[in-house]
Image: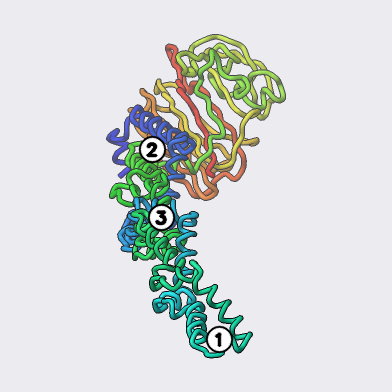
Amino acid sequence: MSTLKLMLGMIPSTSKIEQEEKALIAEYEKMIAFAGSEALARYNVLHESVNSAGFMQKKKEIESLAYKGSEEHARETEFMGLQKAKDIVSYFRTEGSALLKNFQSLDGSARIKDIEDLQLFVQSPEFRQKEKMKPVTFKDTEEYGKWLEFKKLKKDKEVKKNLNPEKVKRFSELQSLVTSSAFLLKKNMKPVTFRDTPEYQKLQELKTKKSASDIVSYYRFRNSKEYHNYTGVKDSARLKRYHELQEYLKTKEFTERKEYLLDKRRFEKSEMFKELKEYETLKSSPDIKWYFSVKDSNKFDIIKNRKLTFSDEFDGPAPDSSKWINKYYWGDKLLHDSYSIATDLHYYTPSDNLEVRHSVLRIITKPQKITGKVWDSSKGFYNKDFNFTSGIVNTGASFRQKYGIFSAKIKLADHNVRNAFWLIGNRITPHVDVCRSGNGKVWFDLFSSPGNHYKKSIGSRYLSDFYIYTLEWTPQSLIWKINGVEVMRQTTGVPQEEMYINLAGGVDKPIGGISSMEIDWIRVYQEK
């Protein structure tokens, strides 16, 4: 099929191949550059982060959060329960009441102390006994006994007759007593009752003091359920917990946490969400999509699997002397001079027939009379007159390589001129023509050893324009290509030594005008 294509000229155009390779290299370089970009570095960091088990778990936890069932909700619920509890409600109602203020103002005061003392007094057994006393009359007094003694002595005969001095004396004493104003007052006394006692006065004092409105309120409050509840709650653990929860619910921490847990869009407001959106944006970006579509593809295998070991784009004003020798390698090494082969019709000048213009090397072959050295295997070196001149360059001193890809964009031009791109080592063979012109055709040759010559040719249509000539050299084979289409394959006699590049013009028969071989670029790769 490739032979038919070559015959019909149905091969990819040189410009298309160059454009495609240039685009491929540019895209590859873009991929390499992008591989070191901040955008990709950020994407890789985010990719690892958002796809990690930890990120997924954290995202799930955030999205599954709810206020109900949370510690904050439990505390708020506990507080609300305490806030509504009867004992707590009663406590705070009492705490701010006028009754409590009145109670607190009196509690422990001298007034209450007096009342408490009186209360103790009237509750004493002595007071109770006194309270039960019967009315006291004259008959219950000591004087009444003396009155009866007086009346008895008054009737006594011995007293009347003054017979018993002692009785008379006693009678006189009693008579003085019973006739005294004090005795008569006692004799005529009204009955004495409990109301006439100091105890009764104390009781009245107690009643008076306890009847004061603030005192009545004091004791009523002190005996109330409200006060009992107040004192029970005041220093209790429940009230302490109530205040703890109340303070906690006022904190910024609680408010923010509650708002966060109630917010259905809490994840969307998180830094994790920002990371996720940044990751998704990067992931959907054209550059990232493109990078990952080509990174592990075989699109760049041809570039990845080769290393550029030599190249010349001919950007200078003349061939680069650090790369090229402008004569045969052995002429430069041994003679330091140019020479041609004795059978050649042309002489290789050092520079007159080499020209670089518009980044293209031209090896010019032209009619020109000149005398120069030639080599003859039987005669050695001697001078000879030539009617034609041409040029040659090689990398014998700067670059040699065994195996690899040798490629050049060349216009071989005039079919009457012998132009060639070939490889050679330190001996005459092996010799490989990557391409050469001759007899109106393009030739591909391998001289593996003296007498062993393998060749193939294609038509003259390939002489008049630029084509990319490539030799793919491995230990097992040589493959010649033109614009990527295989022309010839050789698996025997494959060179196994380093070889260097030669580019040269020349003539096999006289020509009537100037002709040139043009080389746009040359590149050599080593398989990785």
- Compared with residue 127, is residue 446 higher up or lower down, i.e. above or below? above
Task: Label 2, secondary structure: give it.
Answer: loop
* In the image, farthest residue toward the front: 161
Q: CA distance from mark 1 to mark 3?
A: 74 Å
Q: Residue at x 64, y 28 (%)?
A: 398
Task: Label 1, secondary structure: give it.
Answer: helix
Amino acid marked by disc 3: Phe
In the picture, which quadrant includes the N terminus?
A: top left
Amino acid marked by disc 1: Val
Look at mark 1 in the image and give the residue it sits on. Answer: 159
Q: CA distance from mark 3 to mark 2?
A: 113 Å
Q: CA distance from mark 1 to mark 2?
A: 184 Å
Q: Quick check: marks 1 and 2 in contact, CB under 8 Å? A: no
Look at mark 2 in the image and give the residue it sits on. Answer: 484
Quadrant in the rendering for residue 129: bottom left
Amino acid marked by disc 2: Gly
Q: Residue at x 39, y 63 (%)?
A: 204
